[in-house]
């Protein structure tokens, strides 16, 4: 039975670790907040009081952390204490260049590092139905298959180290932009006194259809911005994709524009809302709703 | 057997009229190009040499024309010669305010006018699988149902006169933006040496999924920009939606930005390509492809 | 002594007509509001109760009206009643294509029409210090010189009929954009706790210097948005320039973006403020000021 | 006689060091390229073969380097070898947060660090007419006055450490945007067959006037894009200002948009041209000029 050390047991990492327990792995978890570690123990895993304790006997180390600096810090400890040959799977969404750099550093210590950011949100994590975009070698990807299968539904290796993060960055660009386009369409339709529910139905049936429209459209009409995926996290991700595009010399006019809008939402105090709150911003910009400020 | 006069037998109108023939209507068509009128006759319809001849004995008049001025001109003739009580269904994509104005003018002459722009493209027209967004009264919408059923699959009344055009304008905004977002994502991914096909697969499985990605993604990867829906028509439509948004005081930052990009494609001589040629523009802006100019 | 009929005696037209009186012209004015016409009479001009009365004996007809439809309506009357050979000078800011069309129509009736939009604001009108961008023939421009000299300081013929409006449209694009850039710079600097007055001083001394910075910078720092030139008028002008650019196939990414921002200001109820109120919008978007709504 | 160590003797640093020689300072210079160091020696300065040699006996250390990493690397050496109490003046344009961090680090070693980015270009450097935006303490600013006076004309302390870089970043945002607005205006005017020189004259006389129009307008009309200030440097600076705005939660829609356009110019191979080459990009986007690619 493979031992999986799981570092970062938050909204996403918690249910992912639980799914690994259910799939028969020996899961030893660690989180800065002791309470979350204990919740995993109560769910059939084991509790570690430090990263070192979690990883030293593990065959697989999984991490699910907020941002690049967190991943850097935790992987430094992992690299110091994990056994040679250990598979290290980082599920966090971080900068592609940092992911590639960490993979190289891990390789230098005999570790096999994969970047494996996910999409699908809290519900996807609970349902073990995440989409996972994996960067790393074919061989390591194959070795990690049982772990991926226990937490995800669509699992695709998209290229070498860092490639998973590149695709995740592109994903976040498309999602943010699609939400904003739908927000603009809804406010435009509402301003004309048209039946918005009927309109969404017909939009969804044609080339304007999207997962965003299907999953978030009704809540947007109802102005229900309960997260879901928070504005402040999407803002962080837009920072990643705009910086990576700049680095690569890729021009993303719409990506850059929507990054400003998400930054504005956060600056206006809406960072804790679902990213579909872009609708509220468009409505305020159009004078149709009062500012929350 | 209801007689349907069909004015405008082009790429879209031709197959729509043919589907009406197949559904059992007596279809009398007219097009400025005699050849297209004769094609309808050969397909089981009848040929009229003028709008007047087409409409004077019809119970329903259908129009499918390029732009607002064409519709104005043809409907002026229709209003002059159609019998009182005739249903007039304009399938064209035109300005919402012009549609509302024409409906009022028609009503003043005892005619019942519906705006009924479609989406679904040439293939949707051929397959009688169009999405149709209808503006007009409940009663007229009900009366037109047999005609709509013969050419469309998703048929929704979205509000009073002009509402169909409003929703179509919103549709074009969303479609253009979604294509551009996908284009930016693809160029971004390609620039990083990632497996783009695998990346599209995983993007399509999550919240970034869309009808655009599904139907146009593979052709975009292959740089196959055969229309489909031409840039120059989408450019016209972006003019409609940006003007209507301005008129209504609705702010559409992404819509306005993508309107500039489509205008650029057309200005650079790509007006005859499919709108997915936005990918080519992003690639040129990013220095990854040579300009066609 | 040349008789000048002056139609439109508002904030701009009023002082311009007064300056023509002072320059020795026989000025006969008309305005829908009787009060304004009488003010001109009290200032040494004559009052006409209709456009017809004003223009029938005039050698020059001048108009200063809010928008294209107003100019169309008034010039229709002018064309009907002015004597052949009369110089018609439209100082209004309207669409270049409408200006060109009206000039052609006037020429068909033996009139000599110039488009002559101005910049410089109320103060420039009072001081007879306007910049005037003139479209029309060299000959008519020369004939109009005494009138222009009485109201303007920088008077330039920029091309044939409509050219004045084209340059005015470009002027409004540059002015709006420059205000917005300064607004973004100020909010950026303020957010960093830097001495903003010192910063403006050094910005103004280099390549970032502009008339906008010099004339509006201090009031912007003080959040004094007393017009000046109102947001709602600039919004109208942005509609002109974005539509004209679209018509001409010219891509104006920054112009289109700032047009959205000005439209937003107006939609949020700030239409009556000076256009430098873009600063307030940027501050609100950045969470630094509460919305006025 | 104060000894000034000057590190970085390129297009800007070379003439600045020469002006310090002329002002009577004992200037000891160092550059990675030996040739540039020798040019300073021939001009009356002294040549150092290392940073250490240059700074160990200096009372003032000045640096003029391309980017944040260069400044970090050189200041590490400076901090290791300069005498306590030495004034360290960094004239480079780098990230405000890096400038503040280096100032704190220097202070920890008893050094007095000022960030002092300049504007005015090569000609301003040669003419000792630079604008200098200084961040640091009042006291250190006063102590550095003789050095600033020898190279600049408008010298303003704008706040504490990092503030100079903040204002420089704002300056680069405004300059890039103003060039782009002028480019859009010119292409718009040219597309209408208007006399562009006359148009620029009248634009320059009113609220659309700017230093950019005055200094770069004629060359832009002539498509003379000889640098001046290179696109690739301005692209680096746009990276600084967009990142700093993101960090501070400041929304800069126009700044973000023009950053994409400059990035595109560079990606298309125009990085070595003057930043006024934005005109070429707008013309290509508008189909009026062939791509250079």
Image: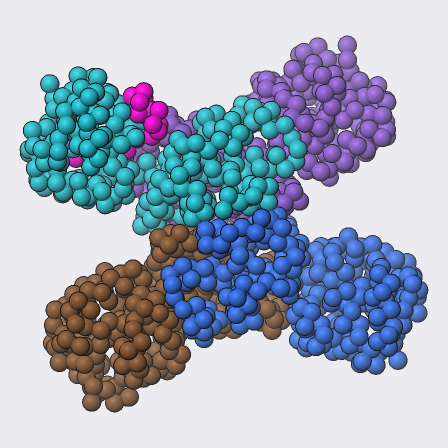
Chain colours: A blue, B brown, C cyan, D purple
Q: Which residues are magenta?
A: C113-130
Q: Residue at x 25, y 29 (%)?
A: C13
Q: Nearer the viewer, residue A206 or C161?
A: A206
In the shown orientation, is residue D1 left or right of residue C202?
A: right
Whether residue D228 is visible here, answered yes or no, is no
Furthest residue toward front: C35
The N terminus of chain B: image quadrant: bottom left
- Relative to the observer, which residue lies in front, C49 or C144? C49
Indicate whether residue A80 is drawn in magenta. Answer: no
Q: Determine whether, in the image, residue B252 is placed left or right of residue D113.
A: left
Residue A12, x across and y down, in percent: 73, 67
Seen in the picture, residue A208 relative to B243 is either above or below; the reply is below
- The one of D149 and B286 positioned closer to us in this rendering: D149
A61 to the left or right of B216? right
Question: To which quarter of the image does residue D229 belong?
Answer: top right
Q: Position of residue D80 (x, y in %)?
A: 86, 30
**Which residue is at a point 30% across and 30% down the rendered structure image?**
C11
In the displayed structure, does residue A275 sit left or right of residue D291?
right
Residue at (19% x, 21% y) in the render: C42
Residue at (59, 22) in percent of width and height: D130
Percent position of residue A279, x then y: 52, 59
User: Magenta includes C128?
Assistant: yes
């Amino acid at each position: 039975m493979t031992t999986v050390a799981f570092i970062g047991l938050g909204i996403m990492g918690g249910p992912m670790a639980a799914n690994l327990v259910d799939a028969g792995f020996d899961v030893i978890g660690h989180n800065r907040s002791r309470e979350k570690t204990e919740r995993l123990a109560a769910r059939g895993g084991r509790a570690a009081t430090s990263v070192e304790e979690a990883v030293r006997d593990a065959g697989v180390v999984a991490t699910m952390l907020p941002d690049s600096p967190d991943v850097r810090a935790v992987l430094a400890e992992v690299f110091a204490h994990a056994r040679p040959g250990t598979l290290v799977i980082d599920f966090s969404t971080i900068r592609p260049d940092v992911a590639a750099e960490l993979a190289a550093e891990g390789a230098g210590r005999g570790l096999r590092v994969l970047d494996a950011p996910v999409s699908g949100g809290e519900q996807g994590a609970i349902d073990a139905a995440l989409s996972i975009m994996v960067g790393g070698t074919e061989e390591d990807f194959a070795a990690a298959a049982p772990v991926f299968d226990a937490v995800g539904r669509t699992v695709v290796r998209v290229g070498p180290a860092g490639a998973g993060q590149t695709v995740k960055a592109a994903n976040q660009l498309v999602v943010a932009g699609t939400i904003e386009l739908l927000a603009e369409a809804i406010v435009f339709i509402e301003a004309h006194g048209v039946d918005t529910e009927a309109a969404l139905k017909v939009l969804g049936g044609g080339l304007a259809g999207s997962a965003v429209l299907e999953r978030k459209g009704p809540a947007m009409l109802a102005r229900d911005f309960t997260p879901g995926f928070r504005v402040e996290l999407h803002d962080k991700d837009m920072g990643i994709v705009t910086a990576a595009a700049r680095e690569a010399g890729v021009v993303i006019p719409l990506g850059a524009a929507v990054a400003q809008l998400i930054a504005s939402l956060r600056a206006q105090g809406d960072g804790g809302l679902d990213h579909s709150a872009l609708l509220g911003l468009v409505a305020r910009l159009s004078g149709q709703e009062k500012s929350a400020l």
